[in-house]
Amino acid sequence: MVTEFKKIPTSGTHFETVSGDICFKGEAKKVSKNLVECCGTMQGNLRYTCNRCAEEFDLHVNEDVNVFASEGFYEDKEGEALLNVVEFFDGNIDFTALFESELEAFKSDYHYCGHCTHLE
């Protein structure tokens, strides 16, 4: 799902994109001239390999996501809290690209199957 930056209002607009069995949906709202805040959730199931025993299992995904989309280069200001920012350079926000980026970040964490979870 792709939307032009200039079409995102300060009051917010709904977005939803799906990949496999996982859905990413939420609200996008303009917070400054070149910055849009995207708040939502990723929900669904994902085939995953246990980081301890290497067995495949269904990993339940239910993650809150708060990411910013920048139209062009993003420069943080001194003293400003660090933001999770994805830069776009064609005047559009690609919600599918945001979703894929956040899903890969989620998958990079350690996840254990039901058997290995009890071993901790």
Image: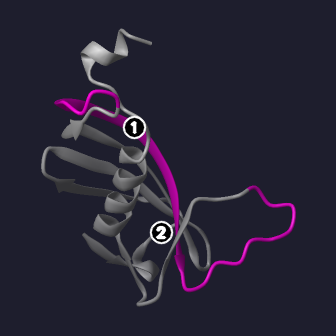
The residue sitting at 31% across, 49% down in the picture is: 25
Report the magenta residues as a range: 52-81
**Distance between mark 2 and mark 1 Cα atoms:** 25 Å
Outermost residue, left direction?
Answer: 20
Q: Residue furthest front?
A: 53
Q: Residue at x 36, y 46 (%)?
A: 107
Q: Is residue 75 magenta?
A: yes
- Residue that mark 2 sits on: 9
Amino acid type of the residue tagged 2 in the rendering: Pro
Which quarter of the rendered picture does the N terminus lie within? bottom left
Image location (x, y in percent) of residue 63: 39, 37
Find the residue positioned furthest to the right: 79
Location of residue 35 in the rendering, given as x and y in whole percent from the top left corner: 58, 72
Colour basis: one colour
Q: Is residue 50 above or below residue 89?
A: above
Q: Quadrant of residue 97?
A: bottom left
| Nearer to us in this view, 109 or 22 | 109
Crowding at dot 2, Cα within 10 Å, few <14 / some 14-19 / many 20+, comes out as few
Q: Secondary structure at mark 1?
A: strand
- Disc 1 marks a residue whose amino acid type is Glu
Queried whether the magenta region covers residue 103, the answer comes back as no
Residue at 27 percent of width and 38 percent of height: 43
Does residue 75 appear anywhere in the picture? yes
Q: Nearer the viewer, mark 2 or mark 1?
A: 1
Q: Is residue 45 visible?
A: no
Give the residue at x 51% y 57%: 67
Which element type, helix, strand or loop, lies under badge 2? loop
Image-quadrant location for residue 90: bottom left
The residue under label 1 is: 63
- The numbered disc on residue 106 is none
- The answer to whether residue 2 is left or right of residue 93 is left
Of all residues, the one furthest to the bottom in this rendering is 90
